[in-house]
Amino acid sequence: MPTVSAFHDWQLGLIDVRRVYSALDAGCGEGRMTRALRRRAAPGAWIVVMDHQPRAVALARTPNAADGVAARVESLPLASGQFDLVTAGHVLPSVANIAHAVRELRRVLAPGGTLLASADSESSGRRLLDWHVEACRRAGLADQARGAAAPSARGRFTLENGAQTLARAFNAVDVHAREEALGFPSVDALLRLYVGGLHLRGAPAVDTPGEADALAHRLRPHLRDIASAAAEPDGRVIVPRRSGCFVAQAG
């Protein structure tokens, strides 16, 4: 069973979750927020998990005694006005139509209900991105460096601009920021994350695992040099992260 992170507990601490008798975990993933809800919501609360991946729904539903539905946030197959609480953990930055998704999340909330929508700051993880851009330049991959440095789609909904989007559908929106850090025990640990997919940012289409591996082989030594120069005396590598949560109230 997935563990509850400090971030999920922090989010739920922003509201009186003991008074939540019905909740939707939209974009449930592997179920960390679902578990936190089951642990902290009112006894016997009705919880529904939703994700566009059926496997995620299955993972989150059974161990948390929840109902589940496979769907996309922009088109929820759920009746209107039935949830005290809707959580959307880092979901809105990645949907195709943010405004439509926000309206759907608002629609399924009961009058007086609450949406908890988390997002990153525009500056979150910037240090690692800058290192990647520099690694691309050192490797002679100028086009990839330019692509990686360009604004990403996730910038459409951040701590800095998300409140304006939510305010079109909700009566009141509060922003709560949380300063954190991604800590890696060693440069090698950071590199394992990096070659797991981050090294592809800004790259042209990579069609085969062999092409992805070849790109990782080309970039890895440069990222190693950059991260090693920035490592702490004990070998740890710290990447600052600023994330947070919007608390939006339905009228």
Image (cartoon, rainbow, N blue to C red):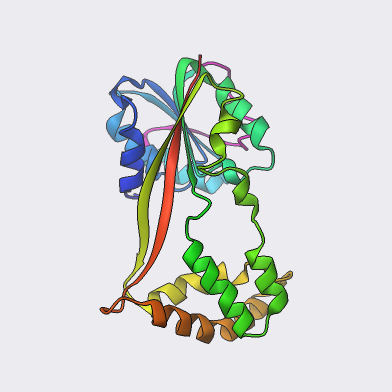
Q: Position of residue 247 (x, y in %)?
A: 44, 30
Q: Which stretch did the figure color magenta?
A: 64-81
Residue depicted at x 34% and y 34%:
12
Residue depicted at x 50% and y 62%:
126
Name the foreground residue: 135 vs 42.
135
Inspect the magenta stretch and tell me whether residue 21 lies in it: no
Name the foreground residue: 106 vs 75.
106
- Count the numbered circles shown: 0
Residue 206 falls in which quadrant of the image? Answer: bottom right
Q: Is residue 164 above or below residue 135?
A: above
Name the foreground residue: 223 vs 164.
164
Q: Position of residue 24 (x, y in %)?
A: 47, 29
Q: Is residue 103 above or below residue 189?
A: above
Q: Is residue 235 left or right of residue 216?
A: left
Q: Is residue 157 above or below residue 140?
A: above
The answer to whether residue 56 is seen in the rendering is yes
Q: Position of residue 87 (x, y in %)?
A: 46, 33
Q: Is residue 84 above or below residue 4?
A: above
Q: Position of residue 211 (x, y in %)?
A: 67, 79
Q: Is residue 20 left or right of residue 251?
A: left
Identity of the residue furthest to the left in this view: 234
Q: Main secondary structure of the magenta part?
A: loop
The answer to whether residue 77 is seen in the rendering is no
Name the foreground residue: 108 vs 165.
165
